Image (cartoon, rainbow, N blue to C red):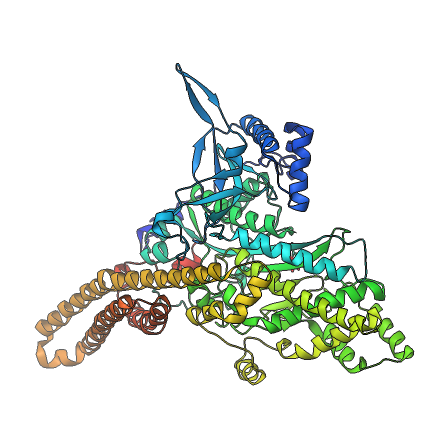
C-alpha cells in the first residue's frame, strides 16, 4: 500500500498523532477534588483557631484581618504549601489586559553564614508591589507614581499550581483606584448584597445577606499545534483572517450530536483533573455546534470565586492543551461561516437562608419576593441596556454579536410564555386601590407560579438575556472575556434598581399604603415601564432590528461606539452611587478598552497585510507562471492560432489571477495608508473609530481576493492550511 499523501506537512503531522494517555489520581473525583486548594479542610488543619475564625469572618462579612492574625494565616499557608512541594508564592491578579498575572517569589531567604530559612509572613501575604508599570492603567498612574500594589482577597482561597502558592489579590494604585477586574466586582457584589437584603427584609427578616451566584459555560475551539503554527494569522490574532469557507460547514450539525473525538476527550479529562484539584467544580463537557468546537461548564458558585475559577480554568486549559499538541482558541470568532464562541453567564441571587431569589416558590409570600427580584432585574436591564452592552464589547466579540448564530447587539430580555402572561396579567389587574377580592385573586395567581418552569419555557436560544426557570442567562458575553466585566455591570445596575425600588415602596408605605399592596403597585409600574425590553421572538431575524428600533432600543454594532456610554453623565452617577467605580476609574477603563481595541485591529491589519503579500501573492504568482509556461508550451506545439482555443481557459485564469493579485496589492496599500492616518490621531476614541470604520473593512475585501485565489491555485501549492483542514482535522 502506498502511504497517504498530504497536501501540507502540518496535516501529515496531525495524522500521526495519538491521544495522550491520561491518568486520573483516582476513579473517585471526591478523593482529589480541591486537593490543591487552601480550603476549609486545609485551614482547619493548618491554622490555629483564632486565625481560622478571622479568615472565616473575612469571607463571610468582609472584615479586616489583624496583622498578628495575618502572620499566623501566612505561616499556616506556608506549612500547607510545603506539604504540597511549593517553593514559591505569588500574588495572583487580574489586570485589565484580560489575562491573569503573577510574579513569583521564593519562600527561601538567606540569613547569613550560608544558612537560610523559608519565610512567608503576614506582610507578604497581605500586600505586594509588583512592577506595575507594564499593566494598563488608562492614565490613573502617572510616571512618577508608577507603582500599584496587590492586596490579598481572603474571600477566594489560595491554591497551588506546580510549585507555586497562588494568592488571589486585587490590584490597585497607590491612590486606591482599581486597576483590575476584581476590585470593582467585589464592590458590586457588596452593593447588590446591601440593596437586595433590604428588599428581602420586606418579606423575611431572617435574610441578612444576599450572595450572587454565577455558573459560566466556556466555549472554545481546539486546533492542532502543527496547524496552528502553519497559520500565522491564528497564531497572532486568534482567528483565521483568510480562507475559503468550505462546502461543508456546520449545516449537518453532526459534530454537535457526535461523540467527542478521542484526542479532544483525552485533553478534556486531563484539564478537568487539574481543574478539579484546584477546586473548580467542572461538571459537563460536550461538543458544540461548530466543528472542533467544545464546551465546558462547572456547577455554579459564589460570583467572585466563579470568576477566579473561570480565569484559572482558561489558564489550565492553555497549559494542558500544549501537552496534547493542541492549542485552545478562546477567540469569539476563529472561523467565519460557523458558530462563534461565547461564555454564557448564568446568574442568580441567593440568601443566607438558602433561598434562590429567582426561583419561584410555593407560597404567595415567597413568590412576591421572586417577582420583586425578577421584575427589578428586567427593569435594570431596560434602564441600563447600553451599559450592559458596553460591558461585553470587544474587537473579538464584534465579529460574533449580530452575526447569524449569536445574540444580536440589541439587548433584550426573554422570559417565556408563562411569565409573559403573568406579567401582562399583573399589569391589567393591579390598578389604583384594590378590592379585597382582587387582592385575594392576585395572591392566588402569584402563588401559582410553577417552581419548575425549565421544561415549559420554550428555550429561546436567540435572546441575549434569558430567564431560564431559576436564573438569568446572559449569553452575549464573549468566550475570551473575563466574566467580571459583565457581572460587575449587571450587579451594579440591579443594585441600583433595587435601591430605587425600595425607596419608591417606602414612600408609598409612608403614605399609609399597606406593604404588600405598595410592593405590588411598584412592581406593576416597573412591568409597564420596562415592557419594551421584553422580546420573545427570533432575535436573529432582520425584522427584530426594525422592531427594536421602533421600540427605541439601541443596536450598537461596534465596540468604539458601544464604549461611549462610559463617558455619559448618568453612567458616572450610577457607578458612583453604587460605590463601584469612580469617575476617574470609569474614564481609565474607557481609555484602556479603546486602546486595546486599537491594538487588536492594528495587529490584525499588519498580519493581514503581511500574509497577503508574503504568502498569498507569491503563491499566486508561482502558479500563474506555471500557467504561462503551459500556454507557451501549447503555442509551441499547436501554433499561435490553434493555441488561442486550446489555451483559452488557462489564459482566462491567468487574467483572473492577475486581477486578484492587483486587487490585493492595491487594497493592502490603501489599508496601510488608512492605518497611518489612524495612527496619527491623538484622541484614543477618534483613533478607535478610524480603525473601526477605515481600517477594518479592508480585511474582508482583501480576504475576498485571497479566497478567490485559493480556489484557483493548485491545492499543492497553497501555503496555508485551508479552512476545511482546520475545522475537520482531528
Ligand atoms: P442547561 O442549561 O444546560 O440545561 P442548567 O439549567 O442546569 O443546565 O444550568 C446551566 C448552567 O447554569 C450551569 O452551568 C449551572 O451551574 C448554572 N446554574 C444553575 N443554577 C444556577 C444559579 N442558581 N445561579 C447561577 N448559575 C446557575
Ligand atoms: Mg447555556
Residue at position x 80%, y 71% from top?
A: 510
Q: Give left or right: position of 344 versus 710.
A: right
216 lies above or below 677: above
Residue 518 image offset from top left, x and y in percent = 80, 72
Residue 327 image offset from top left, x and y in percent = 42, 49
Q: Give left or right: position of 31 versus 477.
A: right
67 lies above or below 593: above
- State the residue lying farthest toward the top: 113
Q: Give left or right: position of 549 versus 528.
A: left
Residue at position x 67%, y 39% from top?
A: 56
**Whether residue 272 is visible:** yes
| Residue 603 location, quadrant | bottom left
Q: 260 or 132: which is nearer to us?
A: 132
Residue 4 image offset from top left, x and y in percent = 35, 51
Residue at position x 39%, y 14% from top?
A: 113
**Whether residue 21 is visible:** no
| Residue 625 location, quadrant | bottom left
Residue at position x 28%, y 66% from top?
A: 679
Amino acid at each position: 500500500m502506498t502511504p497517504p499523501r498530504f497536501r501540507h506537512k502540518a496535516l501529515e503531522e496531525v495524522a500521526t498523532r495519538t491521544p495522550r494517555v491520561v491518568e486520573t489520581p483516582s476513579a473517585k473525583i471526591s478523593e482529589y477534588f480541591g486537593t490543591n486548594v487552601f480550603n476549609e479542610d486545609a485551614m482547619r488543619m493548618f491554622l490555629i483557631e483564632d486565625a481560622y475564625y478571622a479568615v472565616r469572618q473575612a469571607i463571610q462579612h468582609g472584615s479586616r484581618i489583624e496583622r498578628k492574625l495575618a502572620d499566623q494565616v501566612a505561616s499556616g499557608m506556608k506549612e500547607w504549601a510545603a506539604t504540597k512541594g511549593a517553593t514559591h508564592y505569588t500574588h495572583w491578579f487580574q489586570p485589565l489586559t484580560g489575562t491573569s498575572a503573577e510574579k513569583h517569589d521564593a519562600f527561601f531567604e538567606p540569613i547569613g553564614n550560608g544558612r537560610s530559612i523559608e519565610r512567608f509572613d503576614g506582610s507578604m501575604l497581605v500586600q505586594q508591589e509588583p512592577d506595575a508599570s507594564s499593566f494598563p492603567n488608562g492614565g490613573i498612574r502617572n510616571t512618577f507614581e508608577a507603582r500599584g500594589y496587590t492586596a490579598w482577597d481572603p474571600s477566594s482561597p489560595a491554591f497551588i499550581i506546580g510549585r507555586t502558592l497562588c494568592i488571589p489579590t486585587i490590584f490597585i494604585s497607590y491612590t486606591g483606584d482599581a486597576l483590575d477586574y476584581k476590585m470593582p466586582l467585589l464592590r458590586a457584589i457588596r452593593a447588590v448584597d446591601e440593596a437586595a437584603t433590604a428588599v428581602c427584609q420586606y418579606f423575611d427578616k431572617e435574610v441578612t445577606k444576599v450572595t450572587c451566584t454565577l455558573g459560566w459555560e466556556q466555549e472554545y475551539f481546539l486546533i492542532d499545534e502543527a496547524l496552528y503554527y502553519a497559520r500565522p494569522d491564528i497564531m497572532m490574532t486568534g482567528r483565521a483572517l483568510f480562507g475559503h469557507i468550505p462546502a461543508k460547514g456546520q449545516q449537518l450539525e453532526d459534530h454537535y450530536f457526535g461523540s467527542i473525538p478521542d484526542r479532544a476527550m483525552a485533553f478534556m479529562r486531563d484539564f478537568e483533573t487539574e481543574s478539579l484539584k484546584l477546586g473548580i467544580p467542572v461538571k459537563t463537557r460536550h461538543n458544540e455546534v461548530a466543528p472542533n468546537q467544545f464546551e465546558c461548564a462547572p456547577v455554579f458558585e459564589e460570583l467572585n470565586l466563579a470568576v477566579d475559577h473561570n480565569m484559572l480554568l482558561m489558564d489550565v486549559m492553555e497549559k494542558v492543551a500544549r501537552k496534547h499538541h493542541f492549542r485552545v482558541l478562546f477567540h469569539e470568532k476563529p472561523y467565519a461561516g460557523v458558530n462563534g464562541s461565547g461564555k454564557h453567564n448564568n446568574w442568580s441571587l441567593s440568601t443566607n437562608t438558602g433561598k434562590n431569589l429567582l426561583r419561584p416558590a410555593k407560597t404567595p409570600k415567597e413568590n412576591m419576593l421572586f417577582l420583586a427580584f425578577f421584575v427589578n432585574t428586567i427593569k435594570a436591564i431596560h434602564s441600563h441596556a447600553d451599559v450592559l452592552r458596553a460591558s461585553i464589547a470587544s474587537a473579538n466579540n464584534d465579529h460574533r454579536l449580530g452575526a447569524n448564530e449569536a445574540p444580536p447587539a440589541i439587548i433584550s430580555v426573554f422570559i417565556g410564555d408563562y411569565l409573559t402572561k403573568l406579567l401582562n396579567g399583573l399589569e391589567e389587574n393591579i390598578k389604583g386601590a384594590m378590592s379585597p377580592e382582587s387582592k385575594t385573586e392576585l395572591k392566588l395567581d402569584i402563588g401559582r407560579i410553577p417552581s419548575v418552569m425549565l421544561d415549559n419555557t420554550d428555550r429561546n436560544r436567540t435572546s441575549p438575556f434569558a430567564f431560564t426557570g431559576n436564573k438569568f442567562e446572559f449569553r452575549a458575553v464573549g468566550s475570551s472575556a473575563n466574566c467580571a466585566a459583565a457581572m460587575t455591570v449587571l450587579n451594579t445596575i440591579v443594585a441600583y434598581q433595587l435601591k430605587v425600588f425600595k425607596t419608591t415602596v417606602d414612600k408609598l408605605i409612608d403614605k399609609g399604603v399597606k406593604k404588600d399592596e405598595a410592593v405590588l403597585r411598584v412592581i406593576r409600574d416597573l412591568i409597564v415601564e420596562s415592557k419594551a425590553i421584553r422580546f420573545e421572538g427570533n432575535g436573529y431575524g432582520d425584522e427584530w432590528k426594525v422592531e427594536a428600533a421602533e421600540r427605541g432600543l439601541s443596536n450598537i454594532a461596534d465596540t468604539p461606539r458601544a464604549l461611549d456610554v462610559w463617558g455619559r453623565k448618568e453612567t458616572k452617577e450610577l457607578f458612583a452611587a453604587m460605590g463601584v467605580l469612580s469617575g476617574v476609574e470609569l474614564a481609565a477603563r474607557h481609555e484602556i478598552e479603546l486602546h486595546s481595541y486599537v491594538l487588536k485591529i492594528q495587529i490584525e491589519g499588519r498580519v493581514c497585510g503581511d500574509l497577503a503579500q508574503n504568502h498569498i501573492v507569491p503563491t499566486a504568482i508561482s502558479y500563474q507562471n506555471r500557467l504561462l509556461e503551459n500556454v507557451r508550451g501549447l503555442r509551441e506545439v499547436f501554433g499561435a492560432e490553434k493555441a488561442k482555443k486550446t489555451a483559452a481557459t488557462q489564459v482566462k485564469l491567468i487574467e483572473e489571477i492577475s486581477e486578484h493579485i492587483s486587487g490585493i496589492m492595491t487594497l493592502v496599500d490603501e489599508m496601510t495608508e488608512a492605518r497611518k492616518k489612524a495612527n496619527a490621531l491623538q484622541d484614543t476614541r477618534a483613533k478607535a473609530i478610524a480603525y473601526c470604520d477605515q481600517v477594518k473593512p479592508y480585511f474582508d475585501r482583501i480576504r475576498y481576493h485571497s479566497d478567490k485565489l485559493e480556489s484557483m491555485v493548485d491545492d499543492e501549492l497553497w501555503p496555508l492550511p485551508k479552512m476545511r483542514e482546520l475545522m475537520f482535522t482531528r
